[in-house]
């Protein structure tokens, strides 16, 4: 279903049209993916199947995707609770449609995610499931069936999967438990089986562990827990190719730079440890929460852009990082507004484009960071 744009969307579409590939080329404006490709990387965004959100069914949003993106990821439509809302009831219609659109527009599509290791995000029916007298066997049957079902359905059309998402508890660094992992005898057993099953069913695909262990102060235990998990994968010969860095950044202080130097040093040590183990890196969910910044939009946008540029300059300096994915292109559809409104009630401004689909300083910062990054070997 393609909806006619509202009057507001029609105005926004005119603004977004300035960044359509043919118009942009004539004006000398390069898309973010084009800038990334010149350095051996890719740039992309989350996308939704809901035409009232950040969807390709929204003409203005589709224009931004075509202009700036070579890579897409479904915001929700591949998650377990969406494709299997009840036992034996599968619904791939939304993701099928998204993948068809990405194919028609020459964009790759990442798979996000096969297992979200948090009770609140597992299917409700699975958390309430009776695993019977042989719980480990039943849990393994359900898990392998799900991973095989998704990966075999899409074959080589999906080349990269977030196999497991957020298995480490941020406050403690311990592993999260769910009904499934309890039935299997532990989280490590669950995660290992998910990755081994994905490798067997999709041997072509990049298999990613994805988590939020950001560079801001207060994330040390989370980062340490992720490093322990990654070290365990290597000891147990679990087929994990890369670490997904969600990159939901959070500014601090009136100009966003509070604690920045310490953050950079700690972040480099973390990335050094990850890459020393042989893992690749991806930025999977980039946006910036404008905490502590002034209410005035111009000052806030500058603070967001400067903070993101500092983060990207450090993170993109690692040649093992090839993909940068924003968690949405426009403030109008960002999840952050509902998740954490500003105390002063000013609308959040976390994305490369504002709610009228106009490019912001954050887009310029991303473009500049991509252009300045070291070139990746072919």
Image (cartoon, grey):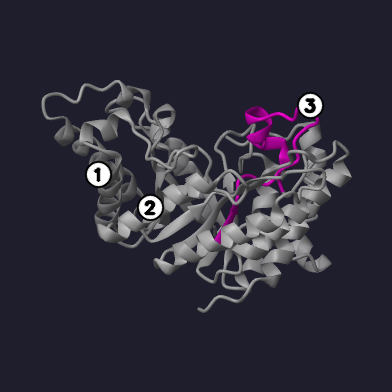
Q: Which residue is mark 3?
A: 345
| Of residues 28 and 136, the one drawn nearer to the viewer in this rendering | 136
Give the secondary structure at mark 2.
helix
| Residue at point 83%, 40% (across, down) | 11
Q: Residue at x 63, y 64 (%)?
A: 314
Bounds of the magenta span?
A: 323-351
| Element type at mark 3 | loop
Left or right of 12 on screen, residue 57: left
- N-terminal label among 1 and 3: 1
Q: Earlier in the sequence, mark 3 or mark 2?
A: 2
Marker disc for residue 228? 2
Q: Earlier in the sequence, mark 2 or mark 1?
A: 1
Badge 3 crowding class, 10 Å Cα cut-off, few under 14, some 14 to 19, many 20 or more, is few
Q: Position of residue 301 (x, y in %)?
A: 81, 47
- Tell me if 342 is positioned left or right of 272 in this view: right
Q: Residues within 10 Å of mark 2 (few under 14, many from 20)?
A: some
| Residue holding disc 1 | 189
Residue 216 visible, this angle? yes
Q: CA distance from mark 3 to mark 2?
A: 39 Å
Q: Which mark is residue 229?
A: none
């Amino acid at each position: 279903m393609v909806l006619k744009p509202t009057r507001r969307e029609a105005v926004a579409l005119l603004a977004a049209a300035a960044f359509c590939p043919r118009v942009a080329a004539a004006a000398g404006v390069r898309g973010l993916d084009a800038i990334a490709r010149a350095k051996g990387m890719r740039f992309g965004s989350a996308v939704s199947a809901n035409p009232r959100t950040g969807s390709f069914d929204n003409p203005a949003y589709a224009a931004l995707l075509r202009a700036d993106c070579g890579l897409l990821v479904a915001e929700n439509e591949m998650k377990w609770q969406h494709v299997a809302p009840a036992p034996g009831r599968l619904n791939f219609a939304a993701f099928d449609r998204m993948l068809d659109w990405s194919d028609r527009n020459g964009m790759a599509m990442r798979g996000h995610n096969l297992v979200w290791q948090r009770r609140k995000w597992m299917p409700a029916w699975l958390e309430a499931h009776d695993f019977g007298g042989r719980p480990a066997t039943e849990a393994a049957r359900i898990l392998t069936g799900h991973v095989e079902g998704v990966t075999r359905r899409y074959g080589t059309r999906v080349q990269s999967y977030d196999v497991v998402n957020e298995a480490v508890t941020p406050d403690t660094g311990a592993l999260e438990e769910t009904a499934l992992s309890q039935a299997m005898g532990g989280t490590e057993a669950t995660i290992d089986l998910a990755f081994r099953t994905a490798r067997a069913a999709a041997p072509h695909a990049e298999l990613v562990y994805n988590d939020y262990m950001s560079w801001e102060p207060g994330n040390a235990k989370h980062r340490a827990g992720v490093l322990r998990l990654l070290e365990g994968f290597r000891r147990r010969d679990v087929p994990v190719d890369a670490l997904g860095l969600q990159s939901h950044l959070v500014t601090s202080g009136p100009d966003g730079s509070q604690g920045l130097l310490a953050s950079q040093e700690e972040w480099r040590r973390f990335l050094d440890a990850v890459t020393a183990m042989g893992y690749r890196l991806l930025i999977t969910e980039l946006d910036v929460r404008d905490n502590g910044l002034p209410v005035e939009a111009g000052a806030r946008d500058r603070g967001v852009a400067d903070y993101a540029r500092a983060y990207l300059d450090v993170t993109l300096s690692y040649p093992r990082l090839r993909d940068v994915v924003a968690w949405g292109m426009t403030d109008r559809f960002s999840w952050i507004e509902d998740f954490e409104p500003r105390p002063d009630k000013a609308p959040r401004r976390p994305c490369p484009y504002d709610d009228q689909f106009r490019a912001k300083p954050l887009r310029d910062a991303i473009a500049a960071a991509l252009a300045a990054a070291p070139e990746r070997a072919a």
